[in-house]
């Protein structure tokens, strides 16, 4: 994996630690995050878990090591060096990682870019995101943009008349697919899809359409049509194609890049040291933190005569300039960094 800065001065604080997520109970959610991923969060439905988050709307909590019980936001504020020297950090965690279980269709929505959010949303970040499909029922689809160019007023009239779905591009999805959702792209996760989402550290969502659904309080959820039409790409979108992915093999593991953009990079690690006597060595350099999200299997991280077991659904924060580690197990992990 990563073998940089072996001579750096390291302290106990540079050790990896588990995170405990915040849960969300949106009306479209299911129960797979509790049953399949062992989240044990008393919400029904459990639509989302914010696995690695310093956002005030759903901060995650450190669940192991010397900072156990503290909010991740408080830890990185006190130890900005954990984030690394990448210019996007600026003393704050620039990404947010979620699991999302869509038992029903999500709203049709769009996110602003950084420039619009800074100007109109009190200096917040915009929201570009990536989806990794963990599972999908046969025939499941997501919304990705419009079939063809449309004028704003035509979109507005289609929303008012309940006909927006006629113009939405729907794309079939399968397990292990990857989708890059740039800010401004009209999109929606369809029913029966389970995903891992990596995004900018933002919770700005403008709903265009929500199927006239009623929430648990008997109200229709708020739409944000004016703002959405200000930021949406209405030019029409080409159907997204799966990126070329090349597995790189080394003893005990293989890796492939899923996404690399200005906001984050995501790599998939396929770990299998069951038949390999040499455990996988890892050390994170000074440029960026790493986050390891276990999406299949389980394993153990060994470091400084300590061990950190992890299981399917677990999220591990590895500070920049980390201690040297070795990983053993059979698992699929998403590795996220700046």
Image (spheres, helix red, strand yellow):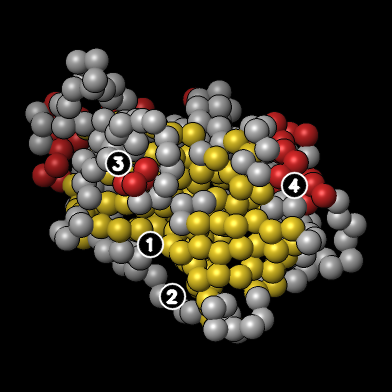
Tell me, yes or no, whether the two marked residues, 1 and 2, touch with CB atoms within 8 Å.
Answer: yes
Lateral position of residue 199 relative to residue 216, left or right: right
Q: Which residue is mark 2?
A: 245
Q: Which residue is mark 3?
A: 31
* Labels 4 and 2: the sequence-earlier one: 4
Lateral position of residue 143 relative to residue 40, left or right: left
Q: Nearer the viewer, mark 1 or mark 4?
A: 4
Q: Position of residue 130 (x, y in %)?
A: 43, 53
Q: Nearer the viewer, mark 3 or mark 2?
A: 3
Q: Position of residue 243 (x, y in %)?
A: 39, 70
Q: Residue at x 18, y 22 (%)?
A: 214
Q: How far is disc 1 from disc 2 in space, using C-alphas?
A: 10 Å
* Labels 3 and 2: the sequence-earlier one: 3
Q: Nearer the viewer, mark 3 or mark 4?
A: 3
Q: Residue at x 10, y 36 (%)?
A: 163
Quarter the C terminus occupies: bottom right
Kindly state the secondary structure of the residue where label 3 is placed: loop
Q: Residue at x 74, y 58 (%)?
A: 306
Q: Residue at x 32, y 51 (%)?
A: 194
Q: How far is disc 3 from disc 2 in space, using C-alphas?
A: 31 Å
Q: How dense is the environment of label 2, judged by Cα within 10 Å: few (below 14), some, or many (20 and up)?
A: few
Q: Is residue 66 above or below residue 268?
A: above
Q: How far is disc 3 from disc 4 in space, using C-alphas?
A: 34 Å
Q: Position of residue 60 (x, y in %)?
A: 56, 36
* Labels 3 and 1: the sequence-earlier one: 3
Pick the residue in front: 102 or 274: 274
- Say whether residue 145 is visible: no
Q: Give the tally of numbered discs.
A: 4
Q: How far is disc 1 from disc 4 in space, using C-alphas?
A: 28 Å
Residue 178's mark? 1
Q: Which residue is mark 4?
A: 82
Query: Where on the picture, by quarter, is residue 165?
Result: top left
């Amino acid at each position: 994996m990563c073998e940089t800065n072996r001579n750096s001065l390291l302290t106990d604080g540079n050790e990896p630690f588990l995170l405990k997520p915040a849960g969300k109970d949106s009306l479209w959610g299911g129960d797979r995050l509790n049953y399949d991923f062992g989240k044990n969060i008393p919400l029904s439905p459990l639509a989302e878990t914010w696995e690695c988050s310093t956002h005030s709307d759903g901060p995650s909590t450190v669940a192991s090591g010397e900072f156990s019980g503290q909010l991740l936001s408080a830890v990185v504020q006190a130890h900005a060096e954990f984030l690394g020297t990448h210019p996007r950090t600026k003393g704050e965690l620039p990404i947010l990682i979620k699991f999302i279980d869509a038992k029903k269709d999500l709203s049709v929505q769009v996110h602003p870019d950084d420039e619009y959010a800074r100007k109109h949303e009190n200096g917040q970040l915009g929201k570009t995101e990536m989806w990794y499909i963990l599972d999908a029922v046969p025939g499941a689809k997501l919304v990705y943009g419009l079939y063809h160019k449309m004028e704003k007023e035509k979109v507005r009239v289609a929303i008012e008349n309940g006909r927006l779905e006629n113009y939405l591009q729907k794309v079939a999805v399968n397990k292990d697919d990857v989708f890059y959702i740039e800010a401004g792209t009209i999109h929606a996760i369809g029913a029966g899809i389970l995903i891992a989402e990596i995004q900018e550290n933002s919770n700005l969502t403008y709903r265009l359409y929500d199927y006239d659904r009623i929430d648990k309080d008997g109200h229709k959820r708020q739409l944000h049509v004016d703002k959405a039409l200000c930021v949406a790409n209405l030019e029409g979108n080409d159907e997204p194609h799966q990126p070329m992915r090349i597995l790189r093999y080394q003893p005990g593991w293989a890796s492939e890049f899923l996404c690399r953009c200005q906001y984050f990079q995501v790599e998939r690690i396929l770990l299998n040291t069951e038949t390999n006597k040499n455990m996988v060595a890892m050390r994170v350099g000074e440029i960026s933190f790493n986050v390891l999200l276990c999406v299949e299997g389980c394993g153990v991280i060994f470091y400084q005569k300590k061990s950190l077991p992890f299981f399917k659904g677990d999220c591990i924060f590895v500070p920049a300039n980390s201690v040297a580690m070795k990983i053993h197990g059979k698992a699929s992990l998403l590795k996220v960094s700046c």
